[in-house]
Image (cartoon, rainbow, N blue to C red):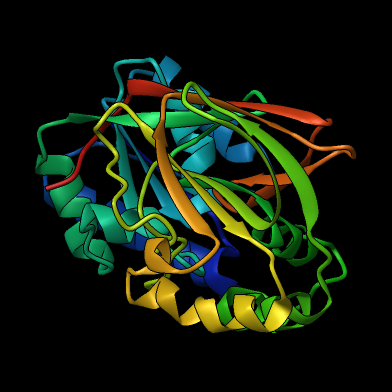
Amino acid sequence: MVAVIINPVAGGARPGTARIRATQAAAILEQRGETAEVSITDRAGHARDLTRAAVARGARLVIAWGGDGTINEVASTLAFGDVPLGIIPAGSGNGLAAELGIDPRPEIAIANAVRATPSSMDMGEIGGRLFVNLSGIGLDAHVASQFNLPSNVGRGLAGYLRLGAWAFISYVPASYTITTAEVRRTVRAVLVVVANSVQYGNGAKVAPGARVDDGELDLVVVEERWRFATFCRAPRLFTGSLARAGGCSILRIREATIECSQPMVFHVDGEPFVGGTRLDARVHPRALRICVV
């Protein structure tokens, strides 16, 4: 049996889209001789429950149809187990799917996931929460927290861009003490990113050298010197040259500790959380099985 878990609001989908996708997924799987179990989430955390139930019923593959948040819920539940993950990208950014080369067309993504031989990829952990793509503290976490407020009605990429533009003007960076096996430093940073993969999505490459199967994470620190200089560095996200910008550093790590004088807002795969004044990050090599061609 192949389970498909659909987020009905991923990427700002219109009402009724989820049912159309559910019918489509079932038809594609049945055409390929697979028994399909298709579910639609109705709340935060529901994908975790649906994944656990699918595994308990003997699913050989669980496919997440949604954005990075939905993929995170499914992947975190499958982590350290034998059942692999498949992905149909439908979010605002689709960063992990882009790096894995997953076709955005559902019929091809499903067919490829079903026929693929499972491979292994790393997962990261920060503040006790697993992530598959990347996590962040600072400006990106601030935008994610604003995006997920119930009062935010602007979903999809346009909503992210609107909030990001305002945050870029108004956000006040904090100072962080970062400790790794190699260094201990205190910096005033606009971004502290712990990346398993390369990009946020939409081509924004914050960790251009990251790989999902190298047993390490990339720690990206973007210092705040003055706001105009930070603004000038932004285009480097889309050219893969962020590491060459002044005030930016990228370090390969297996674990790190980030400390701040105040509780930190952080995100895992775009989902925001409030942590304490210390966050521990680490890599889990080969923690997830995934079906990609």
Does residue 282 appear anywhere in the picture?
A: no
- Name which quarter of the figure residue 99 lies in: bottom left
Seen at 42% across and 41% down, the residue is 251
Seen at 48% across and 21% down, the residue is 181
Query: How many dots with numbers?
Result: 0
Report the front residue among 212 and 113: 212
Seen at 55% across and 83% down, the residue is 232
- Left or right of 174? Residue 110 is left
Figure check: 202 above or below 144: below
Where residue 107 sits in the image (x, y, percent)? 21, 63
Figure check: 174 above or below 182: below
Where residue 218 sits in the image (x, y, percent)? 41, 42
- Left or right of 112? Residue 93 is right
The quadrant of the rendering that contains the N terminus is top left
Report the front residue among 28 and 102: 102
- Name which quarter of the figure residue 3 lies in: top left
Does residue 87 appear anywhere in the picture?
A: yes
Report the front residue among 198 and 123: 198
Where residue 202 sits in the image (x, y, percent)? 41, 73
Where residue 280 sits in the image (x, y, percent)? 64, 24
Seen at 54% across and 55% down, the residue is 7
